[in-house]
Amino acid sequence: MTALRGSRCDACAVTLYPAGDACPRCGRETAPVTLSTAGELWTWTVQRFPPKSPPYVAPPEGFTPFAVGYVELPEGVRVAAVLDTDLASIRIGMPVLVEAGAGVPRARSAE
Ligand SMILES: [Zn+2]
């Protein structure tokens, strides 16, 4: 499992994802940080038509609807991720594991 890399301002404890060089609150330089992989699903929806291409690249077997959501991590940052989970089982607040994927973070149920 490849944890996401973000950045953090030690002066005001703000964590960023994607990583940024400067803190959006105080402007100080941030330091790289490895984010937690375990979080909670904050909200989600289903992408029912192919996103604009580029940048979207359809898989070889063609487009199928997929879920996307925001995963809230203990660091206080919300990460947009594709949800590799059965659509019928998805619910807000469910525990998920999130990791770096090809292009976008991927999350799956931790239950
Ligand atoms: Zn700061």
Image (cartoon, grey):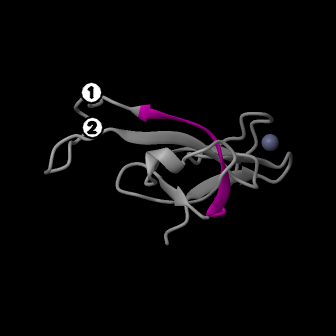
Residue at x 53%, y 40% (from the top left corner): 69
Residue at x 70%, y 50% (from the top left corner): 30
Asked if disc 2 is less than 8 Å from ligand 1, the answer is: no
Give x and y (percent) for residue 8.
72, 52
Against 92, residue 98 (above or below) is: below
Give x and y (percent) for residue 11.
86, 49
Task: Count numbered badges in the picture.
Answer: 2
Residue at x 67%, y 56% (from the top left corner): 39
Of 87 and 95, nearer the camera is 87
Dot label at residue 39: none
Against 12, residue 74 (above or below) is: below
Residue at x 75%, y 53% (from the top left corner): 75
Q: Are marks 2 and 1 in contact (CB under 8 Å)?
A: yes
**Does dot 1 land on a helix, a strand or a loop?**
loop
Query: Magenta region: which residues?
Result: 33-46
* 38 inside magenta stretch: yes
- The residue indicated by pointer 1 is 52
**Badge 1: how crowded within 10 Å, few (<14), some, or many (20+)?**
few
What separation in Å lies between label 2 and label 1 (alpha carbons)? Answer: 6 Å
Of 27 and 6, nearer the camera is 6
- The residue indicated by pointer 2 is 56
Q: Ligand 1 is found in which quarter of the picture? A: top right
**Does dot 2 land on a helix, a strand or a loop?**
loop
Q: Is residue 9 left or right of residue 51?
A: right
- The residue type indicated by label 2 comes to Tyr
Q: Characterize the magenta stretch by its predominant secondary structure.
A: strand
Outermost residue to the front: 88
